Amino acid sequence: MFCYELRVLSNSQPATRNPQPVGLQLIVKFIQLITLTLLISTPFGYWRDKTRKYSLAWFLSIHIPIPALYLIRRAMGLSLYYLPAVTVFFILGHILGARWHKPPGSR
């Protein structure tokens, strides 16, 4: 009977697989996430600017980094609440990569 009670008590608490970060830890993780988003999407923006619009390479340059950013966000324990910021910095990284590709006189 005692063993059964211990098992019931141990199973009654929900298992937290990936707890949400709190406070300063949350801010640091958010800054890391947007920095990684910029670092990952900038080379793909550079590649996208060199390809013909609506070609397969153009499509891949936009969509290849998305699963990586999804996995990074999930590994950091951040929820969908941060998706708008990730989207903004993803687009900003593509714009910076495209500007990096163009010569200084044509901007």
Image: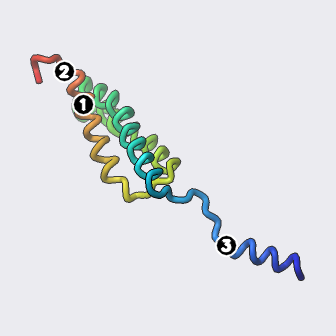
Q: Nearer the viewer, residue 38 or 32?
A: 32
Of labels 2 and 1, earlier in sequence is 1
**Secondary structure state at the residue bearing disc 1:** helix
Q: Nearer the viewer, residue 2 or 98?
A: 2
Residue type indicated by callout 2: Lys
Give the labeled residue for mark 3: 13
Q: Residues within 10 Å of mark 1 (few under 14, many from 20)?
A: some
Instruction: Name the outermost residue toward the front.
Output: 24
Residue 79 % position (x, y): 44, 57
Instruction: Name the outermost residue toward the bottom.
Output: 1
All told, the count of numbered labels is 3
- Left or right: residue 94 compared with residue 5: left
Give the labeled residue for mark 1: 96
- Left or right: residue 40 compared with residue 1: left
Give the labeled residue for mark 2: 102
The answer to the question of whether label 3 and label 1 lie on touching residues, with beta carbons closer than 8 A, is no
Residue 12 % position (x, y): 69, 76
Rendered residue at 44%/56% (across/down): 23
**Secondary structure state at the residue bearing disc 2:** loop
